[in-house]
Image (cartoon, rainbow, N blue to C red):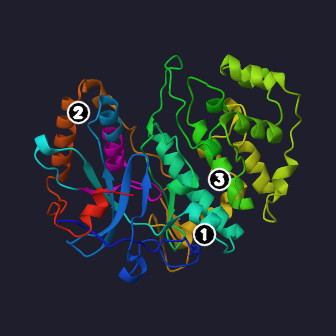
């Protein structure tokens, strides 16, 4: 049985800045380093707790997905996230280590997923008072884009890339997490997609302008905002409303041409055209930080392009010269995909491997009711556990369980 641990965690204030020259990512932190004393965090679609796996004594993260079967939309969203976590196989993307055994289907109301326990997240690193070097930024940005290339090659849009959804360990290893808003990319531009995505500060201008169809470029915009935040240690576009968010973007990038607003809703387009014409103020990017070199600003400008059709892709961004050093540092002392020979040279099959196949969401077409969704999810978890280790389930007698099921 899985016992929710005592409240807390080493991530408390995010005090420890990850070091890019520390031990390899394969090393498991000691229990003292990961000793929890409170929940790791709460999100829009669940709560994450630090627990001890009784099978091997290892600290892991336990994510609770509550209220799964309230309606059909919730069923589809949770099942999609669950299948994604079981699908992912990449060093820079969080994946499921296990799923707790569900009760009988009549009592099946929530899902518990076990993932690797990370020590902090990029938001806590950015707001901490400790120095953040150029080496840190390059290693972090390389891993974000590396994970993003994997997701996009599988046809998945994350749709909520932000510092809080980028988990980090003390050795600088980074993993993209929280796929509650993720979905498969829609190839048909006539199909409408929701605008209720991405935390506002990291939301791409096409989403802010009410575009009904968007692509993986919205994730690249979010990474560009995070890159600027790493350089300047402050949020680049911090507005009180979506309209003000759009105004801050045009203050920096200038008034976009009409061609860049072709898919915008009429109200958003009128708002832009009503205001005075704004020239670009890209020189502001050089003032973000002393570490904002010409190469850094060049890559940042390629990411923060108003027109999504002209924005650099995540895959192309990985080839930018600014990331050469970050790639070298990651593959010489952090990753698990490389190996070295006595001469000291490092070898790898592929520095930025794509997904071996697209993520399929065809199962959603056969989900027409909540009960049918419950049956599909219950069967998926049961089949996923076959041939695995001894299955785990929640222990309702645990002293911490009441706190776990009743978050503040």
Q: Residue at x 16, y 41 (%)?
A: 379
Task: Categorize mark 1 by other alpha carbons within 10 Å: few (<14), some (14-19), many (20+).
Answer: some
Q: Which mark is residue 226?
A: 3
Q: Which mark is residue 329?
A: 1
Point out the tag, 1 or 2, that comes first from the N-terminus.
1
Q: Quadrant of residue 363?
A: top left
Q: Is residue 278 left or right of residue 191?
A: right
Q: Is residue 268 magenta?
A: no
- Nearer to the camera, 61 or 39: 39
Looking at the rendered image, the quarter that the C terminus falls into is bottom left
Q: Residues within 10 Å of mark 2 (few under 14, many from 20)?
A: many
x and y percent of residue 125 in the render? 60, 67
In the picture of the structure, the residue carrying the numbered disc 2 is: 373
Determine contact: label 1, label 2, CB under 8 Å: no
Where residue 209 appears, as percent x and y from the top left, is 66, 27
Give the alpha-carbon distance from disc 1 to disc 3, as whole Å: 20 Å
Q: CA distance from mark 1 to mark 2?
A: 45 Å
* 311 to 113, vertically: above or below: above
The magenta-colored residue range is 79-99
């Amino acid at each position: 049985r899985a016992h929710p641990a005592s409240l807390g965690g080493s991530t408390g204030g995010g005090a420890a800045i990850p070091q890019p020259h520390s031990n390899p990512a394969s090393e498991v932190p000691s229990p003292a380093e990961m000793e929890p004393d409170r929940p790791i965090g709460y999100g829009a679609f669940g709560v994450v707790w630090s627990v001890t796996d009784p099978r091997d004594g290892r600290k892991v993260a336990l994510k609770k997905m509550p209220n799964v079967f309230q309606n059909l939309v919730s069923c589809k969203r949770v099942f999609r996230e669950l299948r994604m976590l079981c699908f992912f196989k990449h060093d820079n993307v969080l994946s499921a280590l296990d799923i707790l055994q569900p009760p009988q289907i009549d009592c099946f109301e929530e899902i518990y997923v076990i993932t690797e326990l990370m020590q902090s997240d990029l938001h806590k690193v950015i707001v901490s008072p400790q120095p953040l070097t150029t080496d840190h930024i390059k290693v972090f940005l390389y891993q974000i884009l590396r994970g993003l290339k994997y997701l996009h090659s599988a046809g998945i849009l994350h749709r909520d890339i932000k510092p809080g959804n980028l988990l980090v360990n003390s050795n600088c290893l980074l993993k993209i997490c929280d796929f509650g808003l993720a979905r498969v990319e829609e190839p048909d531009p006539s199909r409408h997609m929701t605008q209720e995505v991405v935390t506002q500060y990291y939301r791409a201008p096409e989403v802010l302008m009410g575009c009904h169809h968007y692509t993986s470029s919205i994730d690249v915009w979010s990474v560009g905002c995070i890159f600027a935040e790493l350089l300047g240690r402050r949020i680049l576009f911090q507005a009180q409303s979506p309209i003000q968010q759009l105004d801050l973007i045009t203050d920096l990038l200038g008034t976009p041409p009409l061609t860049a607003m072709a898919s915008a809703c009429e109200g958003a387009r009128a708002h832009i055209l009503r205001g005075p014409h704004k020239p670009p103020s890209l020189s502001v990017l050089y003032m973000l930080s002393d570490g904002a070199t010409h190469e850094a600003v060049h890559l940042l400008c390629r990411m923060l392009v108003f027109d999504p059709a002209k924005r650099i892709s995540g895959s192309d961004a990985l080839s930018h010269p600014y990331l050469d050093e970050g790639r070298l540092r990651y593959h010489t002392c952090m990753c698990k995909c490389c190996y070295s020979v006595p001469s000291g040279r490092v070898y790898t099959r592929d520095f930025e491997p794509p997904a071996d196949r697209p993520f399929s969401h065809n199962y959603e077409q056969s989900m027409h009711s909540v009960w049918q969704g419950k049956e599909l999810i219950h069967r998926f978890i049961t089949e996923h556990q076959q041939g695995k280790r001894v299955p785990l389930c929640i222990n309702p007698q645990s002293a911490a369980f009441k706190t776990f099921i009743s978050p503040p």
